[in-house]
Each structure stands twice: as structure tokens, then as C-alpha cells.
Image (cartoon, rainbow, N blue to C red):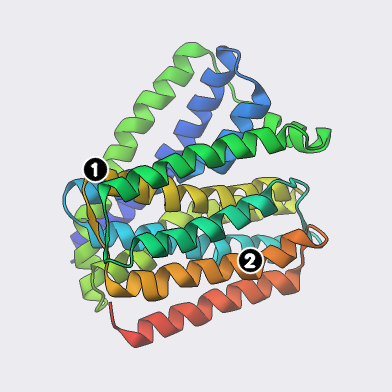
Amino acid sequence: MLETWGMFLLGLLFLMLGGDSVVKGASGLARHYGLSPFVAGLVLVAFATSIPELVVNGRAAFVGAQSLALGNAVGSNLVNFGLTLGLAAIGATGALVVRWRVLSPLLVCFIVLGIATIGLGLDDVLSRIDGMLLLLAFVAVVAFALARSRSDTEEVHKVLSDYTETRGGLGLNAARLVISAVVLFFGAKWIVQSAPTVGASMGMGPLLTGLVPVAIGTALPEIAAAVLAARRGQGELVAGHVIGSSLCNLTLVLGGMATFRALPLPASFVKFELPAAIAFAIALYPMLRGDLRISRIEGGILVAAYAAWLVFVLASGAH
């Protein structure tokens, strides 16, 4: 058992290192080939931070551990809304100020697409056609975010552009991508291999294992980065990651898995787990829609809500 836990923790470490390296490498290559720093920053902030979860879920789907992948996909969303954003707001100096105005419409997109996914899953499966629809939705969301963000303030453009600043030339950044691909591959392999045993040792089935230890474990580096960004006054990076990553998990991750292979859905997924993520998004909307500030009290409410959900789902033991 000690060896299995060691493999699980080493896998988490590899995902953290690989995720950081792939963002730096992609940033450097984007600047080298003349891609707009603003466009590169937006895509990297909102979607590239989901790469570790995407790799883990891709590996899980490939080896047939679909319940683990489902749990991680929706569990990562719950961690994003509850822990990452909540702890960042608590750790911010004053309130977490979010100046990126496209984020509240993107949150609405998440709510609408979440409800649509529940509708697609009422027959207890996401078919390949359903998966393709979700992938098309991901493309539409990226296009919408780019179009709406172009009219945002220069301050927001600068924050997103600065995110792509990295050291090194073409060779170093290409090497970063190659190394990150290898590191992410082994990190995902070890997590998928060890997670069922780790979950079983705590009395958890595959779905609950993905929902809790895997989702929280893969999110820990992002939580730490979010708190640091919040203390630097970069609320756009924090909220952009949370909302963009959640949309990516819902559309690209679930859609990709279903397109690869029809995805059976446990009854609780459409009746409890996914509705819980939508409920978090609905609760967050007035915080972003109003004064574009998330106070420490509101951050505390998000963390308390996640803790209450966690206690409930662990106590129910139904997964």
C-alpha cells in the first residue's frame, strides 16, 4: 500500500511539473512565432491550465477507467469553484477584484452547457454524437471569449499578455514541450494505475475517487498559484482559470472522452454531481455580475459550501 501511495503522490508531482512546463513552453513558442500575446495569454489562462486533468482523463478513458475520469472531470469543477476561487478570495489583500468582464458571460455558458449535458445524459450515456456536440461547444466558447475580450480594457489586455512572458528561445521552449509531454504521460499513468487502490483503501469507489482525492490532488498546485495571484491583485488570472478550466472539463474533456468511446454515466452523475457544479456556478454569478469583486466573506461561503458538499458526499457513501 505504501508503494501505491508513493506512486500516486509522485504522479501528482509529475502532473504539477508537466503542467507548469507545458504552459511556459507554449508561451515561449507563441511569442517566437508572432502570435498575439493577448490571444496566447487568454487561451493559456483559460484553458491550458486544464492540461493535467485532460491528460489524466484521457489516460483513464483509454484504459477503460471511465468512472474515475468522470469523477475527476466534475470533481475538478467543484474544486475550482469551491476551493480554488474561495481560498484565493480569502487570501487576497482586501477583495478579489476581477476586471475581465467576459467571465460572467462565460459562467452563463457553463451553466447552460451543464444543463444541456444533463439533458444529453438522461439516457445514462453520452454517445459519440453527444461528445462531438460538446467539442463543437468548446470551439464556440473559445471563439466567443476571444471576440468579447478584444473590447476589454487595456489593463486586462496587459495582464493576459504578461502571462505569456517566459525565458528562453525556440530550442529551450520546444524542449520544455517535449519534456512536459513525457512527464505528463508518466504522471497520468501512475495516477490512473494507483488511484483505484488509494480510493479503495479509503472505502471509495472509482467515481468518488475521481471526485475527491484525484480532483483535489491535481488542483493543489493551482490553488497555491491562485492564492499568490490573488495577493498580487491578479483576480483576472484566478477567475479566468477557474471558469475557463471548468468549461474545458465540461466540453473538451467530457466531449473528447465520449467521442473516443461512448461514455456510460452513473445515475448520480446527472442527478447529483453535475447539478452540484452548476449550483456552484449559479451561486458565483451574482458575485461576478455585481461589483466584479469577490469578498473574503463570499470566498468563505464558497469554501464552506465545498466542505459541506464534501461531508455529504463522503457520508452518503453511494458512489
- Label 1, on which residue? 260
Q: Nearer the viewer, residue 172 or 146?
A: 146
Q: Residue at x 75, y 33 (%)?
A: 157
Q: Residue at x 35, y 69 (%)?
A: 269
Which quarter of the image is occupied by the N terminus?
Answer: bottom left
Q: CA distance from mark 1 to mark 2?
A: 34 Å
- Label 2, on which residue? 86
Q: Position of residue 281 (x, y in %)?
A: 59, 64
Q: Position of residue 258 (x, y in %)?
A: 28, 49
The answer to whether any part of residue 123 appears in the image is yes
Question: Does 266 appear above or below 50?
Answer: below
Mark 1 residue crowding within 10 angstroms, few (<14) / some (14–19) / many (20+): some
Mark 2 residue crowding within 10 angstroms, few (<14) / some (14–19) / many (20+): many
Q: Residue at x 47, y 17 (%)?
A: 172
Please state which amino acid type lies under the numbered disc 2.
Gly
Q: Position of residue 253 (x, y in %)?
A: 38, 48
Q: Secondary structure at mark 2?
A: helix
Q: Earlier in the sequence, mark 1 or mark 2?
A: 2
Mark sitting on residue 64: none
Q: Nearer the viewer, mark 1 or mark 2?
A: 1
In this image, 117 relative to 127: left or right?
Answer: right
Q: Position of residue 246 (x, y in %)?
A: 51, 54
